[in-house]
Image (cartoon, rainbow, N blue to C red):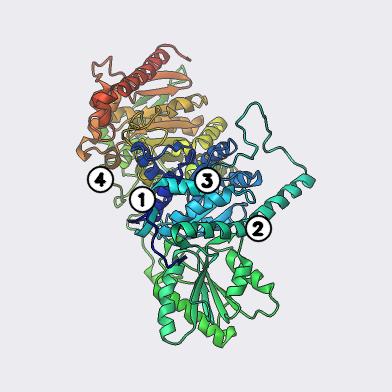
Amino acid sequence: MAIQEKTIIESQAITFESGNEMAALAAAQINYHIMGYYPITPSTEIAQLLDAMKARGEHDIKLIAADGEHGSAGICYGAAVTGARVFNATSANGLMYMLEQLPVQSGTRFPMVMNLVTRSISGPLDIRGDHSDLYFALNTGWVILTANTPQAVYDMNIIALKIAEHSKVRLPVIVAYDGFFTSHQKRKVQYFKDREVVQQFVGEVPADYNFVRDPKTPVTIGAHMNGEDLINNHYQQSNAMYEAYGVFKEVAKEYASLSGRNYLVLNAYQMEDAEVALFLLNSAGETAKDAVDALRKQGIKAGVLGTNIIRPFPAEEIREALKNVKVLLVGERADSYGANGPNLTHEIKSALQAECDNETFVLSRVFGLGGKDFYTDDAIAFFDLAIKAQENKHQVELFDYYGVTPGHKEKGLEPVIEPMHGDAYKTGLIKVEQQEDGKLKVRIPPVRALTAKPKRLASGHGACPGCGIFSALELFFKGIEGDIVVLFQTGCAYVVTTAYPHSSHKQSMIHNLFQNGPATLSGTVEAFFELKRRGEIEVADDVTFVMITGDGGMDIGMGSAIGTALRNHKVIMLEYDNEGYMNTGSQMSYSTPFGHMTSTTSVGKTQRGKAFHHKDTAQIMAATNIPYVFTGSEAFPQDLIKKAAKAQWYAQNVGTVYGKILIACPLNWKSEDRYGNTIMEAAVNSCFFPLYEVEKGETTITYNPDARKKRIPLDNWLRYMGKSKHLLQEENKEMLDEFRAEVDKRWNKLLVKHETPFL
């Protein structure tokens, strides 16, 4: 980015902000119509910031929390075909989950802007920044801009919309910047104080397009094409992509006259006479400038090259920039496995090959995966490799990884706790009998008699103080006899127990992502039975397969869970409900109660927390007709242990079981640690979280606060949590009344089901 030498335009102010903050500010100033989103680190902050700004009345964007990134992409596409201005933000596996939708958006030529806050793609899971997600976007047909500073994030977001809507382009645009390096680090930035300046620059929404908005002029969008038509469609799309190259220059020049900041196609530093150079995207290129300065003082003609746009790829400009460079080292935060170099390495080589007399020698190094830091010393090490190659090309590998640490067997970790097996978890104290009506009768000893049973999870996990996940899970596991194989979906329970190379799990544990946990465990259990049937493994019959979900996992994973239930695999799906996406910072999930405050359902002058009621996953799963569904709470330990024993019997003998346990999250509920059990008990006694089971289609309330004269007002539960106290204020009386009415309606329906078998 070149700064023009002139007085800063008066309409701009100076602040100190991060990339995510500047992306949100740009979106708010543009005032998009729609943002469909789903939280994922490190891009989640953008939606949170926009939600807080909306609560303060600073923009009119309709923020729609989807059930997953695939859904968010669908929301955005649906809004775009209606002629709305559309915005989104995602990272890593979020991009992967919506990947199917991205070519639909570009192939039908509907503009929008999406911020890709780059992050490592699992597996294994890593939430820090690299470019493995960005590289999957290269073939989606989206224009891709890159931003190496928070200032560039702000500016590129404004430039992006104008490119997307340009009559020669009409394509969606990604603005990509480095997760945590750029997204969260604060730097000095300038921004337009008056959003009218931004809105005048981007202009009105183009009207000369076929949108689904006027019934009097019907259109068909996305018609099925044969090969002859499809090749013509893609030819036009390809031409539009190349047109974006010139349009970028045009729009950037116009923006420079407005802002004083001129974004050239390339970020070139000391490249005029460079003989050895590095090609680095985004924040690493900023770091390498210090290395260039140090080497220049030693008389070494070093330079750094980057680019502000990688789709379309600026081949011509790169050829020109490298005409005097003898050795170029391309550093990339991603790999293209088996291709002897990642994507941009080959694209640069291809660009250079088009110039017959070019003699630039190109090296390739993969670095910085999973957010591994890149320092000035690392840039100097890259230059040393380039200099060595300049002296003797055969001494340096063309392609390699940089920063790999070899392991040492003698330093291998030894288990602190001996692996435990079924006998350790068999007490013989729990009796489950099938009665004449087919239902189960469970007898358990006093809870204290089961305390001798070892915990399934070792101490040493990193959960927050007062977290209810592990006390609730361990109580549930008291009712499970023998061996288990457990799958944890991504979430707090997984993250805090498996920080490589450590693990808190005493028995076999598998991890997979939110949206695919149930399907994954389905494959595990069926493979177990098939291997056993063929005599290829010898394992006792009492292995129980349990999937643990929570932190919104029954939103994005709902489809997979229903599929598993309909197929009736012999597994237990157990949801710990902490009423939000707590592992990513307390965003709203569909299980968040009505009116409750999260980081994406802010409380302010224009909104009062979540706008719709919580999802009743137990009833949804009961509708799949699986043999056993239950709810539980650690505040009622005997009830939960009995249900665990039933769950095990049904999972071993009949089919799928689903259970839901409400658990406390003091950090994000803004409650005191000491009140965890009290809050759980109040949730049950207020009838917000009733305790019941659906056994073979028949509903039984296992604890009735009315019958026991324990019923309390809903207010008595809400007052314990800072996230819901605002509902008790007089100005929110109407919302509180609606919440009470919904709780009463669901409780009364449950009473009728309890009294009427098979209803």
Q: Amino acid at mark 4?
A: Pro
Q: Amino acid at mark 1?
A: Thr
**What percent of the width, then of the height, locates residue 623?**
50, 24
Is disc 4 placed on a helix, strand or loop? loop
What is the C-alpha distance between the residues marked 1 and 4? 14 Å
Q: Are marks 3 and 4 in contact (CB under 8 Å)?
A: no
Q: Nearer the viewer, mark 2 or mark 3?
A: 3
Q: Are marks 3 and 1 in contact (CB under 8 Å)?
A: no
Q: Amino acid at mark 2?
A: Tyr
Q: Nearer the viewer, mark 3 or mark 4?
A: 3
Task: Kindly identify which residue carries mark 3.
Answer: 203
Task: Kindly identify which residue carries mark 1.
Answer: 497
Task: Kindly identify which residue carries mark 2.
Answer: 242
**What percent of the width, then of the height, locates residue 610?**
37, 32
Q: Quadrant of the rendered structure where residue 613 is?
A: top left
Q: Residues within 10 Å of mark 1 (few under 14, many from 20)?
A: some
Is disc 2 placed on a helix, strand or loop? helix
Residue 508 visible to an observer of this rendering: no
Question: Above or below — where is 389 with respect to 154?
Answer: below
| The disc label shown at residue 465, or none | 4
Q: Nearer the viewer, mark 2 or mark 4?
A: 2
Question: Above or below — where is 206 with respect to 745?
Answer: below
Q: Residues within 10 Å of mark 4 (few under 14, many from 20)?
A: few
Q: Nearer the viewer, mark 3 or mark 1?
A: 3
Q: Amino acid at mark 3?
A: Gly
Q: Is residue 678 left or right of residue 368?
A: left
Q: Earlier in the sequence, mark 3 or mark 1?
A: 3
Q: Earlier in the sequence, mark 1 or mark 4?
A: 4
Q: Quadrant of the rendered structure where residue 410 is?
A: bottom left
